Amino acid sequence: MGIVYRWFMRPFLRFQDSERAHRRALLGLKFMASFWPARWTLRAGCSHRVELPVNFCGSTYKTPFGLAAGMDKNAEALRGWLELGLAFVEVGGITQHEQHGNPRPRMFRADKAEALVNRMGFNNQGSLNVQKRLERYSMRHGVYPVPLWVNLGKSKITSLEEAHLDYATTMERLWPHASVFVVNVSSPNTPNLRDLQNDDGLIRILNACQRVNNEQAALSNGKVKPVLVKVAPDLTDEQLEHMVQTARQHGADGMVVANTTISRPEASNAKEAKVFSEQGGLSGQPVKSRSTDMIRSVYRLTSGEWPIVGVGGVASANDAWEKITAGATLVQAYSGFVFEGPGLGKAVAKGLKQRLEENKLSSIKDAVGLDHRS
């Protein structure tokens, strides 16, 4: 599936607007998942039987690899993602209020660098509409078979002073359907959002979300759900250390490292230079090294005792292995699916199994943070 995608489909996508190509791919996945012959085709090309069980925040994941936020903002293709061999799926970012995001064009692709620049601005249908969609899914298909993560964002019309209420409202509406919540205070595309990475803003959000968490758990006679914080790769080492301390002290169960960056690499040609000149967050291969370095720092700061999710430039098993050995328990991809196609989950799972065998390790747990022990 990967070779077919790279040779035939990816060249075709180069002639399309990036956002339209993204939308068509999502609708195509949703459509294919609606018919069993198409689902069988997806499953045959992308699914796998590799099991690399790993424990994360008290739950066992079939493999360490899943979908990052941004690919399916409104949880539209849930059945389709199940056929791609993913261990978990993160939807969103979802805000309290429906919003259209920033003006178009707002997504740009640098093919040679395998990078994307976007300034989407948390475009999504809002928490009420996503709540109704997840309720319909539950009624028709039951509980989602793999952990479903929800990325929480702030509505543009909500002030920074009221941001904690925005996050908490979305969490309350979607709590029954989610396995994990990710507090996103690090997108560069909502004005002043990154200001919420400071002490006061982050503490208010975490406290509000944990109140909802405890209330909903009590109402359902269930357990509270993990709440993670997603950070920006543009933090200094000192800022990262301070944010880790703040998040841990106020109930965060782990950290997602890292979001898109506002920094830019050197362009190799005029087309890349044009893409890199666009305002917005950069993802893909250029952010890989910084993300991995930050994972290594968080692991060291927490003595490997705080769960880390690695994201940023994961487009192969080698990329995933680097982040795991740096200290990540789970890894995610977004841009990697754009450039490598729907077979990425299968390739990563098989590649990680091979890395374990090469290093004579019995489980992913043994590989997490291996660089530090070496």
Image: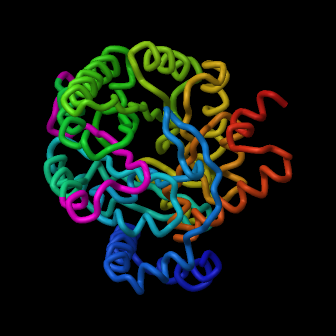
Magenta range is 136-161
Q: Nearer the viewer, residue 277 or 114?
A: 114
Residue that appears at 49% across and 83% down? 41
For residue 65, above or below residue 271: above
Q: Is residue 20 left or right of residue 132?
A: right
Q: Position of residue 341 (x, y in %)?
A: 54, 71
Residue that appears at 66% across and 42% down? 323
Residue that appears at 49% across and 39% down? 59
Q: Position of residue 19 (x, y in %)?
A: 36, 67
For residue 271, above or below residue 214: below
Q: Where is the C terminus found, in terms of image quarters?
A: top right
Q: Residue 372, located in which quarter of the rendered image?
A: top right
Q: Where is the N terminus found, in terms of image quarters?
A: bottom right
Q: Position of residue 164 (x, y in %)?
A: 23, 26
Asked if residue 196 shows in the view, the reply is yes
Q: Nearer the viewer, residue 217 or 276?
A: 217
Q: Position of residue 349 (x, y in %)?
A: 65, 59
For residue 139: magenta? yes
Asked if residue 99 shows in the view, the reply is no
Question: What number of labels is visible?
Answer: 0
Q: Residue 369, located in which quarter of the rendered image?
A: top right
For residue 316, above or below residue 219: below
For residue 351, above or below residue 9: above
Q: Nearer the viewer, residue 22 or 371?
A: 371
For residue 353: magenta? no
